[in-house]
Amino acid sequence: MATIWPSSLPQSFLQEGQDNYKETEPAYFVRTEMDAGRPKSRRRFTAACRPFSGSMYLTREQKDILRAFWKNHGGNQFSFPNPDYDGESSSAADLNVIFVAEPTYVRAGFGWNVGLQFIEVP
């Protein structure tokens, strides 16, 4: 994969606040309601996409960089810094991700808080 998250943008999500980083386990299983008795469950995938989202603070220049990145690579898979990587764990330093939704921008002082939604692709 040749496309990578621009180094001129933040390499991690904001840490403060409850809406700054969220992740969800992949939907590996499907449940089916039965006419009688308990629902049945079966594995849907062996490798599924893991959704995660977060926010970053951007300057005006960084917002322009993100807009250009979105315009040129928003529909493609790219390499993004792993939010769980601490330099010592066995998890990879970068994830292969795609955007789930368009970035959202909220004015914050002299810059912007941007909301990002991704899925990690296996």
Image (cartoon, helix red, strand yellow):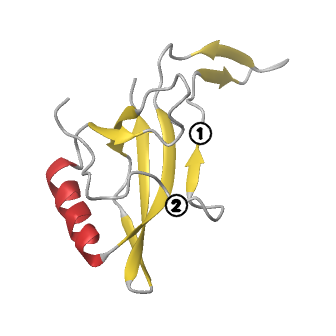
Q: Callout 2, which amino acid?
A: Leu
Crowd rating for badge 1 (residues with CA inside 10 Å; few <14, some 14–19, many 20+) = few
Query: At x 38% / y 34%, what residue is drawn?
Result: 94
Kindly indicate the quadrant of the structure image that contains residue 60.
bottom left
Classify residue 58 by image quadrant: bottom left
Q: Residue at x 44, y 27 (%)?
A: 92
Tell me if 4 is positioned left or right of 59 in this view.
left
Position of residue 91 measured from the top left corner of the image (x, y, whole percent): 50, 26
Q: Look at the picture and state if 6 lies above or below 93.
A: below
Choose the circle earlier in sequence order: 2 or 1.
Answer: 2
| Residue 86 point in image, percent of width and height | 54, 37
Give the amino acid at mark 1: Thr
**Tag of residue 42:** none
User: Which residue bears the numbered disc 1?
Assistant: 24
Number of numbered discs overlaid on the protein picture:
2
| Element on which disc 1 rests | loop
The image's mark for residue 14 is 2
Q: Which quadrant holds the C terminus?
A: top left
Quadrant placement of the N terminus: top left
* Picture coordinates of residue 68, whole percent (x, y): 17, 61
Badge 2 vs badge 1, beta-carbon distance below 8 Å: no
